[in-house]
Image (cartoon, rainbow, N blue to C red):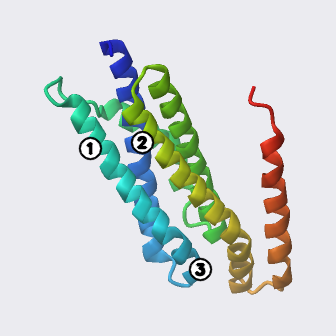
Amino acid sequence: MTGDGKDVIDDYLTDMLALEEHIGKVVKGQLRDLKDYPDVIAALRPTHTTIEHHISDLRMVADRRSAGGAAGSVKPAGAAAVGAAVGLSDLVRGQGLPKNLRDDHTAFNLANIGYVMLRTTALALGDHVVADLAHQHFRDYTDAVMRLNNIIPAAVVTYLEHQGLPVRTDIVSEVNESFARAWGQGSDWPAG
């Protein structure tokens, strides 16, 4: 692979590593702070473990790619750019569990599309090792997004109850079922 192709993939790896590190810090903090929401902790704990594995995998691939080469493939400037992009989620932290989970959902989807782009780039440039890694990480985040989709309605209702509001708890299954049906419709979209 030419230096240009390697540099492009290295930039995507840099971005994904920075994003994973940022998401990992946020989720770790939530695991520490959400003692009143055991269902949320149970859903986020495996995601945090997965994120830690992603960080390790990305570092290992980046180290292998930079072995014997220049200063390394993970560039601080790229990391800062991705950190700034997802840093907006830190500005709304502390506004309650539902908004924190919304921000998690956004971050997980940002990671998902980042891995789609990394896989596409790696395949287009003939790097099947990075492409396979991106595919696995994409699948992991797809699972994490689905877990969040399943817990957010109940978490919102529980949060509203903790605020002393008169809520209908019976609507959670209805909301979950309607979203499951809506997500199932996406499979009919053309590939473009």
In the displayed orientation, state which residue is furthest to the left.
68
* Residue 16 visible in the current orientation: yes
| Type of the residue with mark 1 | Met
Relative to residue 139, is residue 67 depicted above or below?
above
Picture coordinates of residue 95, whole percent (x, y): 61, 66
Lateral position of residue 9 relative to residue 44, left or right: left
Which residue, given by chain and number where applicable, does mark 2 sit on? 133
Identity of the residue drawn at 78% across and 53% down: 183
Read off the residue under disc 3: 39
Query: Is 86 situated above or below 44?
Result: above
Relative height, residue 77 to residue 59 (above, below): above
Picture quadrant of residue 24: bottom left
Query: What SS does tag 1 mark?
Result: helix
Asked whether, in this view, residue 137 is left or right of residue 184, the answer is: left
Taking the spot 59% from the left edge, 80% from the top edge, the residue there is: 39
Mark 3 vs mark 1: give the one in front: 1
Residue behind mark 1: 60
Q: Disc 1 or disc 2, which is closer to the eye?
A: 2
Asked if marks 1 and 2 touch (Cβ < 8 Å), the reply is no
The foreground one among 35 and 146 is 146
- Looking at the rendered image, the quarter that the N terminus falls into is top left
Q: Residue at x 39, y 27 (%)?
A: 127
Label 2, secondary structure: give it.
Answer: helix
